[in-house]
Image (cartoon, grey):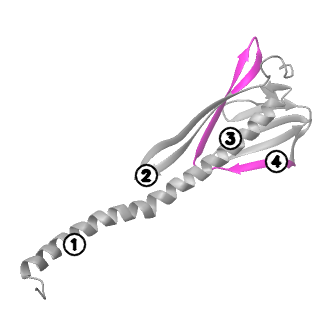
Amino acid sequence: MRKAFTLIEVLVLVTVAPLLMVVVSGIFATFIRDVPRETRLVQQNTTVLDMLQQVRLDVDDAAGLLEQFNGTTANERTLLIRDSDGVVCYRFEDGRAVRTLLKGQGANPDDQRVWRIPNAVIKCRLWTREGSAYAVEIHSHMQQQVAGLTTTKLANSQVFFARSIGGKGREVQ
């Protein structure tokens, strides 16, 4: 029966233990740094999907998609939707999306909703036919900076039609 370790066993342990610690520390660093970063991206993407759900509801209830209203022009960062209460304006700015209900003279701050999405990139484009817009295409993705490189994650593309199939929706102008 042995009661102690030999010198060779101790030397092997002293040599192998640091190598194992280096491997384990890399895995541990991944869990400490990357998992929270990815969790934040997924949470922000959930906010983007919530905002897109609101856009879908507004487009479903739309009386029309506008290319211009009171000096505001629809482009890849701005979406204008005419409904029964006025015009809904979505602005996709760096780090946030803002939904404002515009009435005849401009914006009412009480009718604003803001989604904070610091890593999101959102662009929209109206689909037109015969001079009138009938749908909006929205592209979104999350950008992430890792070690000086910008990566694109959770890319998403959706199209919302202003009138339903079968003529149930209102006429788009």
Task: Report the residue marked by disc 3.
Answer: 92
Q: Residue furthest bottom?
A: 3
Three-letter amino acid code of the residue under disc 4 = Gln
Q: Residue 146 carries which label?
A: 2
Q: How far apart in space, not on screen, are marks 2 and 4 (Cα)?
A: 34 Å
Classified by dominant secondary structure, the portion drawn in magenta counts as strand
In the image, residue 93 above or below residue 17? above
**Of the two numbered discs 1 and 2 in the rendering, the one whose residue sits closer to the viewer:** 1
The answer to which of marks 2 and 3 sits earlier in the sequence is 3
Q: How far apart in space, not on screen, are marks 2 and 3 (Cα)?
A: 24 Å
In the image, residue 96 above or below residue 59? below
Q: Which residue is drawn at 85% across and 34% down?
A: 87
Badge 1, how many Cα within 10 Å: few under 14, some, many 20+?
few
Q: How far apart in space, not on screen, are marks 1 and 2 (Cα)?
A: 30 Å
173 drawn magenta: no
The kind of secondary structure element at disc 3 is strand
| Residue 141 position in % (x across, y down) | 56, 40
Q: Residue at x 75, y 34 (%)?
A: 56
Q: Which of 157 and 112 is in front in this view?
A: 157
Task: Report the residue marked by disc 4.
Answer: 112
| Residue 86 position in % (x across, y down) | 90, 34
Three-letter amino acid code of the residue under disc 1 = Ala
In the image, residue 89 above or below residue 127? below
Q: Which residues lie in the magenta part?
A: 110-136
For residue 103, what is the image quadrant?
top right
Three-letter amino acid code of the residue under disc 3 = Phe
